[in-house]
Amino acid sequence: MKLNKRQEQIVEIVKNNGTITGEQIADELHLTRATLRPDLAILTMAGFLDARPRVGYFYTGKTSGRLLTENIRNLLVEDYHSMPAVVRDNMSVYDAIVTMFTEDVGTVFVVDDHSVLVGVVSRKDFLRASIGKQDLTSLPVTMMMTRMPNVTYCYINDLLVDVGKKLIEREIDALPVVKETQEGLIVIGRVTKTNITKALVTLAEKS
Ligand code: ADP
């Protein structure tokens, strides 16, 4: 986060004074307490300063680099996931390819008649099917998918950075977001490399 000149001055004053009231900061800057209020609110919300009622402001010791790292670490799947593209396990490879095109995704999740996750198919799986001599309209999608329990998935309240690590370790592009039910894991979302890129860009534009 880029601080303006006055905010930088406030941080310096607080740093040099230990704990200091808003009134005292205003005096040092020859400004009114009301004029400073928005800057103090921003600095407190951004984590540079902390405020204790009836005591005053103090410096948290956090640099903008450290605050950015903390923000990245706290990003949640919940806030950045997308809608999943799913196909039923009785579909043909041909129909699943059509779904991949119409839903404009690179990974499709395969579910059973209870919406329970049974597998995942990606572009490469379909290419593999296409270079064979098989008839794609009669080839079941289940023949080409990576099946459970080998599917890597995540939960809605997982950290985005942990999902990123899984994508890198497993060399894959997407994970289904699942919810545990008595029947099994139900697909409720999707996290891709694009979601993680978007999260980083959003964070960079906010800071
Ligand atoms: P692409 O085929 O577009 O390169 P990926 O790199 O994601 O896409 O897929 C590579 C392989 O990993 C495929 O065989 C696919 O079935 C498998 N795969 C994709 N996503 C997952 C996942 N979440 N869990 C387990 N395997 C996966």
Image (cartoon, rainbow, N blue to C red):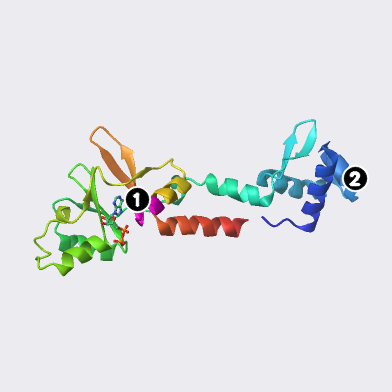
195 lies above or below 23: below
Question: SS for tag 1?
Answer: strand
In the displayed image of the protein, which residue is found farthest to the front? 169
Residue at far top of view: 54
User: Which residue is label 1 attached to?
Assistant: 175
Q: Quadrant of residue 103?
A: bottom left
Query: Residue tagged by mark 2?
Result: 27
**Picture quadrant of residue 108:** bottom left
Q: Residue at x 16, y 60 (%)?
A: 93
- Name the amino acid, label 1: Leu
Q: Which residues are magenta?
A: 167-174
- Name the spot of residue 160 as percent of width and height, x first: 46, 48
On residue 100, which mark appears? none
Distance (Cα) linking label 1 and label 2: 54 Å
Q: Please, what secondary structure does the residue beneath circle 2 have?
A: helix
**In the figure, 131 relative to 163: above or below?**
below
Q: Nearer the viewer, residue 124 or 18?
A: 124
Is 2 drawn above or below residue 177 in the view shown?
below
